[in-house]
Image (tube, grey):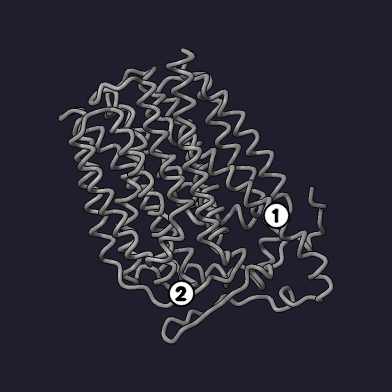
Amino acid sequence: MPPAKSPEEVEPLLDADLQESTSTGDATLSAPRLNHDALTGSAQHHNDSHATNTDWLGLRIVTAMFAFLVMGMIQSTTGVMIPHHYGLSDTLVSLIFLLTPLGYFVAAYFNSVIHLQLGQRGIAVIGPICQLTFAIGLCTHPPYPVLLSLSIFGAIGTGLLDGSWCAWAGAMENANTIQGFLHGSYSVGASFGPFIAGTMISAAETPWWHFYYVLSVFCVIMLVSSVYAFRFQDGKAYRAEKHDGTEQDAHARKQDDLAIFKHIATWICAAYFLAYVGIESSITGWIVVYMIRARHASGYLASICSSLFNIGMAVGRLSLGILTDRLGVRLAIMIYLSTAAILQALFALVELPAVSAAIITIIGFLLGPMFPSGVVMITRLLPTHLHVGAVSFVAALGEVGGALLPFALGAIADRLGIGAFQYIILAQLIVTLLIWMCFPRLPPKTVLVDAYDEYGSLQRS
């Protein structure tokens, strides 16, 4: 266990392994202004503390990965859980998808305040508590309106943790790798969630709310581990990054928030996330219902399909990074999306449940790098000081897409039948591909240098 450290030692502005800045011609981006004293220090002090800092960083990364795993479990089980108890129409069930953006916007509003007053430690406490409240509440199998209210708490917790840890990881030199670990962990959780829930309901024949006993245990583990790993990251450590006075920094943040809208890349990426996150949420939320009603699969096989899709995404996020780098992110995503659209057309034509499960797994594999690659595109196309504000904006719109498309799909299913699912996903894949092709070519690569960005309140998915 790493030893406790004094406040002065807790959070250097940059670790030696996280410092890099490159520039090439017109693509040069200015690095954030840093506190020289905090960076230079004595060589002996740096050598003594470097190993310990690395240990703490590794612990925090693992803790953040576990938090993402729990997020995946929470957000992937709606399609498995709700239809088994409430007997509502698809439209009413779809209301739960609209609450995630609401929770994210609430989290976005309070994220900066929490960082200023309580630091990352505040996020490590409040986020898991919100999710634990949601899980414990559903253990009581409450009426549907109460379930919707509890879902807002869960979404707020997800928004706080998701945004904060993504912003923190995104400021590292090896941001793509760490982001892949985080989002890969989310997909692992999203695959295990429906599998555990489906097994408990179909095989063990337990009431659906017993799954939330398991989820509550995971939330408690997340709370304890997060508080331990980030216990030194208080408001004082965070405010120390802000140099002199908060008024000037707040004014600079406001200017940056407005400047992001002047770049066409912001709007292209916003449209891309709006479309893509809608695809991911629709498949995760409705594949179980579709497989049962349209393909006449058993409840167990249907829930396995949801797990296989998320397993495919996890493998894709963890393994396609090297190929994406070799091909170039712009070309690679065009290839992935085109192949996914072809497979989705095949999914619509072949009605065998086993073949459908195999195809949806491969589609998940190809969609794995989509979100991290979108973040790479916008951070490469915009100046460094606009990254946090821009990614926050486009990610929030992604959550809107992740709510609206599943809701619209449920409303369409009420009128046309659940068979419309396969064609809506195909159309959305084609639209997403066309939007991606609107991105301009990337400038020479620039590496973000700040290890703990002062605007660390990113809102994603």
Tell me which label, 1 or 2, sits earlier in the chain.
1
Gap between marks 1 and 2, in whole Å? 33 Å
The residue drawn where x is 63% and y is 48% is 62
What's the residue type where badge 2 is placed?
Lys
Q: Which mark is residue 445?
A: 2
The residue drawn where x is 64% and y is 33% is 220
**Residue 160 x, y percent position in the rendering:** 53, 47
- Near-viewer residue (396 or 253): 396
Instruction: Tell me, yes or no, whether the two marked residues, 1 and 2, touch with CB atoms within 8 Å.
Output: no
- Near-viewer residue (297 or 36): 297
**Residue 225 x, y percent position in the rendering:** 68, 41
**Residue 443 x, y percent position in the rendering:** 39, 77
Q: Is residue 353 above or below residue 322?
A: above
Q: Is residue 157 above or below residue 212?
A: below
Q: Is residue 311 above or below residue 305?
A: below
Residue 81 found in image quarter: top left
| Crowding near the residue tagged with mark 2, few <14, some 14–19, many ≥20 C-alpha atoms within 10 Å | some
**Residue 307 x, y percent position in the rendering:** 42, 33
| Crowding near the residue tagged with mark 1, few <14, some 14–19, many ≥20 C-alpha atoms within 10 Å | many
**Left or right: 71, with 424 as reference point:** right
The residue drawn where x is 76% and y is 65% is 50
> Residue farthest to the top?
205
Label 1, on which residue? 234
> Residue farthest to the bottom?
25
